[in-house]
Amino acid sequence: MYPPRNFSRTPRPRIRENVNEAIRSREVRAIFPDGEVAVMATIDAVRKAKELGLDLIVVSPTAEPPVAKAMDYGQWQYENKKKQHDARKKQHVIQVKEVKFRPNTDDHDYDFKKNHALRFLKEGNRVKAVVQFRGREIAHVDLGAKLLRRFVEDLTGVGQMDGNMRLEGKHYHVIISPVKAAVKESKPKGESEAH
């Protein structure tokens, strides 16, 4: 029999770092709302900020001495979250989209998948084209290589090949990255490059 485990159910108190009494440095360059800037002991700066009904927050911890600003902590948190949200909204995550073929893929299916790849590249994503071999088809690797070469040639203006075509197990694949000029012209004028 195992001894019973003790799990404490009390939540740990959240410690605000670099705010008021949690500031570890002896002195700070304090900035107050009235425009006063002074290098003073941390205790005195916290006391003065509290007299004004504000919190003392370290905004630049790497400076010598650290720069602290007297402001409302809740408002400062809100503004930081808003900045992070806006930055996340503007960034574009490049994804790798996969397009699968078989060595004897029909022309209509090939064109259909090629159009998907064109759309993916114009959106700024990378495309991984894979020729999948089953059973005895692996004996005809040359057909897969021919199909991938044709695919890369058809996407020449919009995408460029990264590295070489590779055969791994029963999959022959190539990765195609978007050409920046094609991505820029496909976006409407209102959108920015970083979007």
Image (cartoon, rainbow, N blue to C red):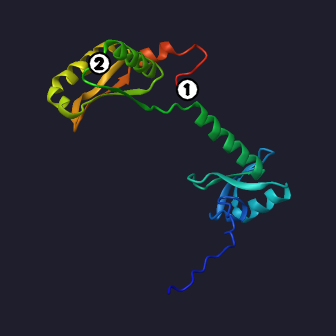
Q: Is residue 85 above or below residue 42?
A: above
Quote the CA–CA distance across marks 2 and 1.
Answer: 26 Å
Q: Mark 1 = which residue?
A: 195
Q: Mark 2 = which residue?
A: 152
Q: Residue at x 49, y 33 (%)?
A: 93
User: Label 2 neighbourhood size at 10 Å, few (<14), some (14-19), many (20+)?
Assistant: some
User: Label 1 neighbourhood size at 10 Å, few (<14), some (14-19), many (20+)?
Assistant: few
Pick the residue in front: 140 or 81.
140
Q: Is residue 69 above or below residue 139?
A: below
| Image quarter hosting the C terminus | top right
Can residue 187 be seen here? The reply is yes
From the viewer's perspective, is 135 left or right of 74?
left
Q: Residue at x 41, y 15 (%)?
A: 115
- For marks 2 and 1, the one nearer the N-term is 2
Disc 1 marks a residue whose amino acid type is: His
> Residue 20, how many percent across, how many down?
72, 61
Q: Which mark is residue 159?
A: none
